[in-house]
Amino acid sequence: MYNTLSRLLPMAPQVAFFWRKLGKPFASMLEQASFPLNIQCRCLIFVYARVLGMMGPHDGSGNPSFMTYDGSPVELSWIIPKADPTRKHKVDRQIRFAIEPIDPRTGGLLPGALVLDYLASPVGSLGIVDCQDDAMAWRRTLENFLFPGTVGSQIRDGSKFFVGFDFTSAGIIKLKAYYIPAPKPTLGIRNSNARQESVHLWDPDWTRLRNLVMQLHPSLIKPLDKLISFIDGLDDLYKPRIEIFSVDCVGSNVNRLKIYCRPREGASWSDACRVMTLGGRISSPAMIDALAHLEVLWNNLFPSSRSTSNRQLELPLDSRSGARLSKRNAQHPTRGLLYYFSLHPGTDIPLPKIYLPVSRYCRNDLQICRAVEQVYKVDEKRNNTTPACPEGWVAREVANTFNHRNLTTRTGIHTYITLAYKGKGWEMTNYFSPEVWS
């Protein structure tokens, strides 16, 4: 489908560049997920017509995007279901990506409110973006909370916005909004707007979110208070600090508030377990099962910091020189562990998800693929399921999708591998960078 559309669609240089960098791997992901051909075409046309023009200059003249550690303005992901012998020849995974919207002419950031309003409009949606009547209610409440006094065309200094696209096998697209609050201003440059802001980047004070959740949905106060109770009991260096807020663009009763956070310290297996279970507050059989699979993933990704060692994550050793491999951080933080807590209306506990920064702490992308495959193997064995794919299938699919270099060269194609506790089970997600500027 990608090759056919490449021959048919007219493309200016900026569009052609990002069509190759994003369109090609995205098309491969749709094909490998067994999306019907007509749906593949629909999704690719939407990306061509509505997304590529918001990915910034193609000559690298703009600032590196905050979206990924290598500065690419897009991050793709897929969720492959757990062991299921019936999934052969069916759509077998969720396909998503998120971008940092950037003006291709100036390299400046595009205002999130205007981007979302456009994509949800009859013109911007091309008739395939699913936006219910109140689908934008939560994101507007969140914008007003984070950026009081700011009109839609303004961008608060230091703040960031990403928009996520969730592509369904029915050819419908759902939007997600991500906001990084502005950093706390230094003493000398504070203004009236800054004083009004209730939350800043790396804020350790979660009690300020009570006002937000009461505006979104009063039932969110219960899971938030459980989260605050856990955080209050931690030493300051281990307290998760607020980094990103996210909401889905769906109806209020089925929405969720996601709060991404990083502690300053604490990157061992025991640290991960403590946060995932809220210090033992979540101890259900489903959580025990989730941690068992997370342990398999952890030990295969980080063999020098195995769960039995309780060692902090370390940069891998270069086998030739013994020196630590340098990783490009740019402005995108990669040190330590990243989490989010998802608050759902009517759910009394926050649902945790851990982001393992494999681009920083693993040796190369092939090692990461093999670690991910081990989790599926263990799951199949525990469920007495016949292996659905031959040995090495994860590496082959990643290599086919991101074929601009060999997986053994270094890390960078994988950005994070995550495992989420979903209440009744767990879910693993692979996040990828197309390494636009490599």
Image (cartoon, rainbow, N blue to C red):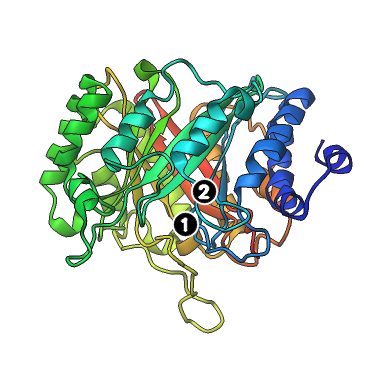
Q: What element carries label 2?
A: loop
> Is residue 137 left or right of 105 when viewed as pictured?
left
Residue 261 placement (x, y as % from top left): 30, 48
Q: In this view, does 342 lie to the left or right of 372?
A: left
Q: In which quarter of the image is the C terminus?
A: bottom right
Which numbered tag is attached to residue 100? 2
Give how far apart the Cα atoms at labels 2 and 1 are.
Answer: 8 Å
Please tell me the numbered disc located at residue 314. none
- Mark 1 is on which residue type? Phe
> Disc 2 vs disc 1: Cβ atoms closer than 8 Å?
yes
Amino acid of disc 2 = Glu
Residue at image coords 54%, 38%: 376
Q: In this view, does 433 lie above or below 311?
A: above
Mark 1 = which residue? 66
For image coordinates 18% across by 59% down, the residue present is 237
Please give left or right for residue 218 compared with residue 261 in the image.
Answer: left
Q: Quadrant of residue 348?
A: top left
* Residue 426 against residue 197 in the figure, above or below: above
Q: Nearer the N terminus, badge 2 or badge 1?
A: 1
Q: In which quarter of the image is the N terminus?
A: top right
